[in-house]
Image (cartoon, helix red, strand yellow):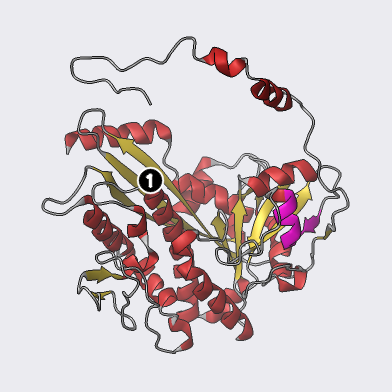
């Protein structure tokens, strides 16, 4: 790591000859020869692809969610960083979808749909050298996250959904929060009574927010917060927005759930300590299905290891096919690692991976819940799978390969481009 520039002297420059030792290494040259080899890695060719179920009634209502973030840093010392985050929920029906040309959608048609059908949330989270006077960055971020979940522009509904999931309020049983690590004394004794939004640690009496239960503070120090805090907030808020719609129908008109498809941009998973909500989500989806109120929910992965793997194996596969990989296949062929005692996704995923090939231009990675965790899922394990697959052809977009129109439109509302959004935020920060 070179010395950084100061007020009087320039930054330390890297050596102009340091690369020679690297290029003369036999190991490096072997790796370069492999890097330049165009051959594809070996993959299994005899995969159990099956015909995609069709013929079920199409889901007539589609709700999709997406989010975006921009990290903005100041250009003068002390260097400051803030994350600007936006999430959006879009509601469409099949009548509206049918009016949009899947190849060249008219901007005015899209505008009319979005005007009456979109909700969005925007916030900013301080990451470095930004704090409320008299409070550290650590506690400023905690307070900001709590207040952002309670966003008044959405009437605090995502926060109510967080309570609904955390306390598992759908079954009528009053449950306290499981113990979590206190953001003050760092002991795993913190909890809150049923339906509480805040409280105090039973050990150190430090003040707690319900959002602390998720563990954002575990990725922070007193002076800085990791960029992953912003990314995790965005992902969780996307999930809460989508489940806010599910909760609304559950509490007001459950018959709507039978004809609705809920679509999330990205995987149906929560990583690390944020996975505390995974089991409550699984239990709700199982409970709802047993009650006869199937939740049709999918997540679409547009990048990552599974997406890259599908790019290798989809050629030559008949259109209208799906493949549900088992745990062994995921570990050996997708992750390319030795088998593990812990099955893939046991603690983090609330959706099973499904490889889908609709036609030569549309192949995608979907996540579809199974309710309880299933190590090696099959088609009958996918909640609402048949109606989901029957609906897919009606919501594709031909503007991008493998695109779903609801995800594309939600992205258009939520996206924050590097330019001009980041530049605008920089100028805004310079003024305040």
* Depth check, front residue: 242 or 13: 13
Q: Is residue 380 left or right of residue 254?
A: right
Residue at image position (73%, 22%) is: 33
Q: Is residue 325 visible?
A: no
Q: Residue furthest left?
A: 134
* Number of marks in picture: 1
Question: Over which residues does the magenta segment extend?
Answer: 320-333
Residue at image position (25%, 70%) is: 208
Q: Residue furthest bottom?
A: 173
Q: Residue furthest right?
A: 46
* Depth check, front residue: 99 or 396: 396
Q: Is residue 106 above or below residue 220?
A: above
Q: Is residue 191 above or below residue 305?
A: below
Residue at image position (25%, 79%) is: 202
Which residue, given by chain and number where applicable, does mark 1 sit on?
A: 227
Q: Position of residue 207 (x, y in %)?
A: 21, 70
Q: Residues within 10 Å of mark 1 (few under 14, many from 20)?
A: some
Tell me, yes or no, whether the highlighted magenta stretch contains residue 128. Answer: no
Q: Quadrant of the C terminus?
A: top left
Q: Position of residue 422 (x, y in %)?
A: 35, 35
């Amino acid at each position: 790591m070179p010395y950084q520039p100061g007020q009087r002297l320039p930054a330390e420059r890297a050596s102009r000859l340091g690369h020679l030792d690297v290029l003369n290494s036999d190991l490096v040259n072997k790796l370069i020869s492999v890097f330049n080899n165009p051959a594809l890695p070996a993959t299994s060719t005899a995969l159990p692809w099956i015909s995609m179920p069709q013929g079920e009634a199409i889901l007539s209502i589609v709700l999709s969610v997406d989010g975006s973030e921009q990290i903005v840093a100041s250009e003068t010392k002390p260097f400051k960083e803030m994350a600007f985050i936006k999430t959006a929920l879009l509601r469409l029906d099949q009548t509206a979808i049918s009016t949009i040309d899947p190849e060249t959608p008219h901007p005015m048609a899209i505008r009319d749909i979005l005007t009456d059908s979109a909700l969005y949330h925007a916030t900013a989270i301080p990451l470095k050298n930004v704090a409320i006077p008299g409070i550290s960055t650590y506690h400023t971020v905690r307070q900001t996250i709590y207040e952002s979940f309670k966003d008044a522009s959405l009437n605090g509904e995502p926060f109510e959904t967080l309570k609904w999931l955390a306390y598992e309020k759908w079954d009528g049983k009053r449950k306290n929060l499981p113990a979590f690590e206190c953001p003050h004394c760092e002991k795993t004794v913190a909890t809150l009574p049923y339906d509480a939004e805040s409280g105090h640690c039973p050990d150190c009496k430090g003040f707690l927010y319900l959002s602390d239960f998720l563990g954002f503070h575990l990725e922070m120090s007193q002076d800085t917060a990791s960029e992953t805090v912003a990314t995790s907030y965005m992902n969780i808020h996307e999930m809460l927005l989508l489940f806010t719609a599910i909760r609304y129908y559950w509490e007001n008109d459950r018959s709507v759930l039978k004809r609705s498809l809920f679509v999330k941009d990205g995987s149906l998973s929560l990583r690390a300590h944020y996975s505390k909500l995974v089991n409550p989500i699984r239990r709700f989806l199982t409970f709802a299905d047993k009650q006869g109120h199937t939740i049709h929910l999918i997540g679409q992965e547009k990048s990552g290891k599974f997406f890259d793997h599908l790019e290798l194996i989809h050629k030559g596969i008949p259109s209208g096919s799906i493949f549900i990989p088992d745990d062994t296949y995921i570990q050996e062929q997708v992750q390319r690692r030795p088998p593990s005692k812990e099955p893939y996704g046991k603690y983090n995923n609330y959706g099973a991976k499904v490889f889908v090939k609709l036609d030569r231009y549309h192949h995608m990675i979907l996540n579809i819940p199974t309710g309880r965790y299933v190590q090696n899922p099959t088609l009958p394990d996918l909640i609402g799978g048949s109606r989901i697959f029957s609906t897919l052809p009606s919501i594709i977009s031909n503007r991008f390969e493998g695109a779903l129109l609801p995800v594309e439109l939600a992205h258009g509302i939520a996206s924050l481009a590097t330019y001009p959004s980041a530049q605008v935020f920089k100028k805004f920060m310079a003024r305040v």
